[in-house]
Amino acid sequence: MIDLTTLASLAGVALVAGFVDSIAGGGGLLALPSLLLAGLDPVSALATNKLQGTFGTASATHTFWKRGLLHPAQHKYAVFMVFIGAALGVLAVHYAPTRLLSGALPPLLILIALYFAFSPRLSDEASHPRLKPQWFTFGFAPVIGFYDGIFGPGTGSFFMLALVTLFGLGMVEATGRTKLFNFTSNAASLILFALGGKIIWIIGLVMGVGQLIGAQIGARMAIRNGTKLIRPLLVVVCIAMAAKLLADPNNPVRQLLRL
């Protein structure tokens, strides 16, 4: 039985994670290790993390929608494809090439960080899209959703990169859509984890309250401050995720460089 002090600490971590996640993604960097430190086994920690994370992404999505910056009905096909992709990813998790993904992801995240740090094109205004919307709906959406289900780190960064660079969205609008798609992939994973009975409900629900509060604060700040807040936080989160993956002694990149 988990004690009240640990529950309160996890709720505090979830609040900070919800704030970060609602702007730049990567809240799992805080929440998942905290669940493991609280004594949950890895599968239960992953499942419970999806539950608490769903509260945050739902809260942020609702805020962007209420402010008129997101119109979920316009993206129903993309949402459906993300859901299907994420569900298939969870089902295929036992076959995931985790070693390959762990090795490939840090360089990708660093490149994404460099792009968001130095690209002169980034702003709150939309630009000319390079690809038609159908490419996102039936290509990028299910592929990134599948990635989130099978592995996960950096999902929000991949959505943001695609929406800004290839489909011409401004940073605030892209952040709103990213929260919608993150919520969708989290929900798909959550349903399958719930069917497997792996969720620690009391922990996930208490952390969910923290996520709701943090996500509300973060989403409102993202809407108010736009690119000048979203851009640097995305850079920091991408570098933090790359560093966390490289901190694992078994990471292929680390072994290759003999760090």
Image (cartoon, grey):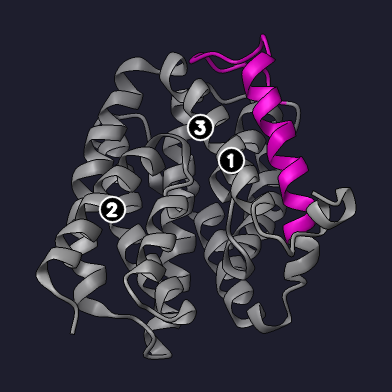
Q: Give the dominant element type of the magenta stretch: helix, strand or loop.
A: helix
Mark 3 or 1, closer to the camera: 1
Place of residue 230 in the rendered image (x, y in percent of width and height, measured from the top left): 46, 24
For disc 2, the marked residue is 14
In which quadrant of the rendered view does residue 204 lie? bottom left
Callout 2 amino acid: Ala
Foreground residue, 127 or 193?
Answer: 193
Q: Earlier in the sequence, mark 3 or mark 2?
A: 2
Question: As displayed, is residue 173 above or below residue 250?
Answer: above
Q: Which type of secondary structure does the marked residue at label 3 adopt? A: helix
In the picture as drawn, the residue positioned furthest to the bottom comes out as: 196
Q: Which residue is mark 3?
A: 174
Report the span colored magenta: 102-129
Q: Which corner quadrant of the image does residue 102 belong to?
A: bottom right
The extreme right residue here reads 256
Name the spot of residue 140 as percent of width and height, x first: 69, 50
Closer to the camera: disc 2 or disc 1?
Answer: 2
Earlier in the chain: of badge 2 and badge 1, it is: 2
Compared across the picture, whether 253 is left or right of 88 comes to right
Farthest residue toward the left? 4
